[in-house]
Amino acid sequence: MRKIKYAVLGVAVIAAAALAPCAMAKKVKKNNSASQVIYTGELAKKVIGYNGTTPVTITVKDGRITSITADANKETPSYFNKAKDKVFKQFIGKTVEEAKNLDADVATGATYSSEALIKNIKAGLKEAKSSKKDGKTASKAKAKGKTKGKKRMTR
């Protein structure tokens, strides 16, 4: 009886794990007008740590990063925890623009994981909506002639 119970439980866990990525397929989800939650699973699916992908979920509120959490991955826990502790501290509290330009340090001994986390965070921040406090907005970029797709004619 116990073997059957554990087998059923195992199937339920596998089914839940298979459905989890589908539930997190959205790139950017707004909680309210001032905060965003960004999942990098699809955005940075080619970013590989030591043992595979290292997706993160980034929360941005009022133009500042309020939290970063690591999502399911296959990294070695001791090294990955070392990497995320070092990397996440450097980004939390920064504005989106400050974080995009940050030259973050990696954790010694967990270089691959650290670099993958940094790339994931920066990929996610490209999707973040910038606030007026961050500086440039889309209307300012257009005013400076930085429109996409139009070529200037030269003589």
Image: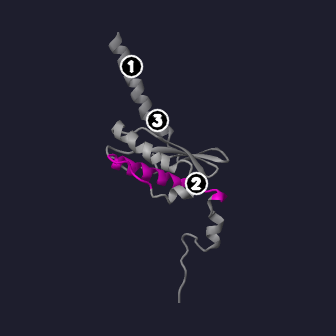
Amino acid at the residue labelled 2: Thr
**Image depth: mark 2 or mark 1 in front:** 2
Q: How far apart, in angstroms, are the residues tagged by discs 2 and 1? A: 47 Å
Q: Is residue 24 above or below residue 46?
A: above
Residue at image location 64% in from the left, 50% down from the top: 62
Question: Which residue is the extreme one toward the bottom?
Answer: 155
42 relative to 31 in the view: left or right:
left
For label 1, count other residues whose C-alpha is less than 10 Å away and answer few (under 14), some (14-19) or many (20+). few
Q: Residues within 10 Å of mark 2 (few under 14, many from 20)?
A: many
Q: In the rendered structure, are the residues bearing label 2 and label 1 in contact, judged by CB atoms less than 8 Å apart? A: no
Q: Nearer the viewer, residue 62 or 46?
A: 62
Q: Position of residue 5 (x, y in %)?
A: 38, 15
Looking at the rendering, which quadrant does residue 16 occupy?
Answer: top left
Report the magenta residues as a range.
104-133
Element on which disc 3 rests: helix
Residue 134 sits in quarter: bottom right
Label 1 and label 3: CA atoms lie apart by 18 Å
Residue 10's spot in the image, x, y percent? 37, 23
Residue at image mark 3: 20
**Residue 69 image point, x, y percent:** 49, 41
Q: Which residue is mark 1?
A: 8
Does the stretch in magenta take in 13? no
N-terminal of the pair, mark 3 or mark 2, is 3
Mark 2 — residue? 95
